[in-house]
Image: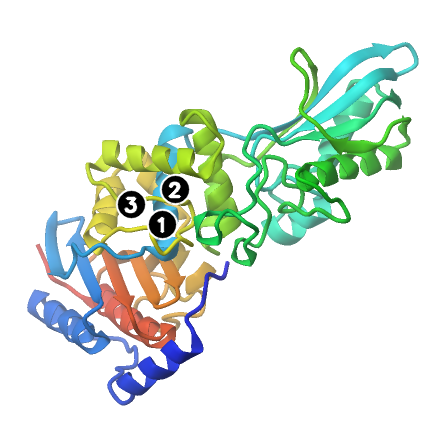
Amino acid sequence: MQQKPPSRLLILLCGLCLLGTLVPPMASAAGGLPELQADLSHQLALAGPHDGAYVYDVTAKRALFSERATALRPPASVQKLYTATAALEQMGASEHLETTVLGAGRLQPGGVWEGDLYLRGGGDPTFGSSSFIRAHYRGEGASVSELVAQLVRVDGIHHIVGSIEGDESYLDSLRGEPSSGYALDPFLEGTLSALAFDRGATGSEKGAHAPAAYAARRLWVALKADGVSIRGPAGAASAPAGATLLARVLSPTVAELLGLMLPPSDNFFAETLLKDLGARYGGAGSTPAGAAVVARTISAVLGFHPRVLDGSGLSPADRTSPYQVADLLVGLAPTPVGAVLREHLAVAGRTGTLALRMRHTGAAGRCEGKTGTLTGVSNLVGYCQSADGHLLAFAIFTDGISIAAAHTFQDHMAITIAASGPGP
């Protein structure tokens, strides 16, 4: 997903400053450690003073390169690695999120439900219509039609004497994240809610709980389409204590959600998962509570303290360093959590935000990474399989220049890293 782009003025100024200095990415010949260090240092010198990089040989267990690696900078979407790590560490790779239908009333003879139904959201970012899920998530998601099937064919409900209410109380009702002042943000490409149908669509619904009301309306319509008569309207309200569980639908696993989030860099998924972490482990389904869980998890697992304000990296006030991100990748590499994380990184020249980068080079198919882009910020971190078969973790932050120029430097450096043969 797109993040906030650099201003035209910044692109123009940086393009003029760097005109004639860019080195196009090319397949470098395998070289030793001095050649690797010299080339990376040269690229950073060309990129300017607001950059830094760190490279570590996971196989040989030694640092290969470090330059301005401890300076704290905005991670942009690299922040999603911290969110993903916390989700895996806290929830587990096989955990699901659930969306449920609760009933306040009783089932009478003839399939008549006397009372109201409550569609309760559990923070599943995939919940929606089957067609939307097929179009956006490769068919991996929790559909409203599954709930209808359970209500009609399992519970035997054919008539509802009451209303259908959407309940989004599991998470707070703030629709954005810190960089937008928690207001709606187009860069989220969705509206945050515990009950976000088709990424929080609201249709013609108005009011403070419009996403929940819209989701209830979609369940109302789907039930009617299946032959269920409904006397009451659709709206938004919290389920009362003691309501009966009638149906539930599960999200893809946490690992599968990360497979949908990381390669395209999905901001909506990241911010929803952050609130889910807050709801489960932080005492509140809010962005600050979730950010505290992420920061606490990273500190406990790896011993360092990035500044975490959100889940997606949209906030320019987030802070981390190339060394910290590389340390994360190095520390997780031999673990089950690291295996899941690496599996779902974008692949150079193949998938996600790296699909069109480093194509037809030695890095294509051999480097996996996470990109990060904000105004004046461009980062690339990940793993490369080097020419001598070693697994190398790297983090490259290049700020203060145009995104196009930053990509050129980053790609050149990744190609050099993949082509290196530093040996044991």
Q: Which residue is mark 3?
A: 307
Could you say where residue 400 lies in the image, as x and y percent from the top left? 29, 71
For label 3, the SS is loop
For label 2, the SS is helix
**Classed neighbour count for the residue bearing mark 2: other residues with Cα under 10 Å, few (<14), some (14–19), many (≥20):** many
Residue type marked 2: Thr
For label 1, the SS is helix
- Circles 2 and 3: CB atoms closer than 8 Å: no
Could you say where residue 290 lies in the image, as x and y percent from the top left? 41, 35
Distance from the alpha carbon under mark 3 to that under mark 1: 10 Å
Which quarter of the picture shows residue 172?
top right
**Classed neighbour count for the residue bearing mark 3: other residues with Cα under 10 Å, few (<14), some (14–19), many (≥20):** some
Identify the residue at image location x=68%, y=36%. 212
Could you say where residue 97 lies in the image, as x and y percent from the top left? 55, 30
Residue 388 appears in the picture as rendered: no
Q: Which residue is mark 2?
A: 83
Depicted 167 relative to depicted 339: above or below = above
- Circles 1 and 2: CB atoms closer than 8 Å: yes
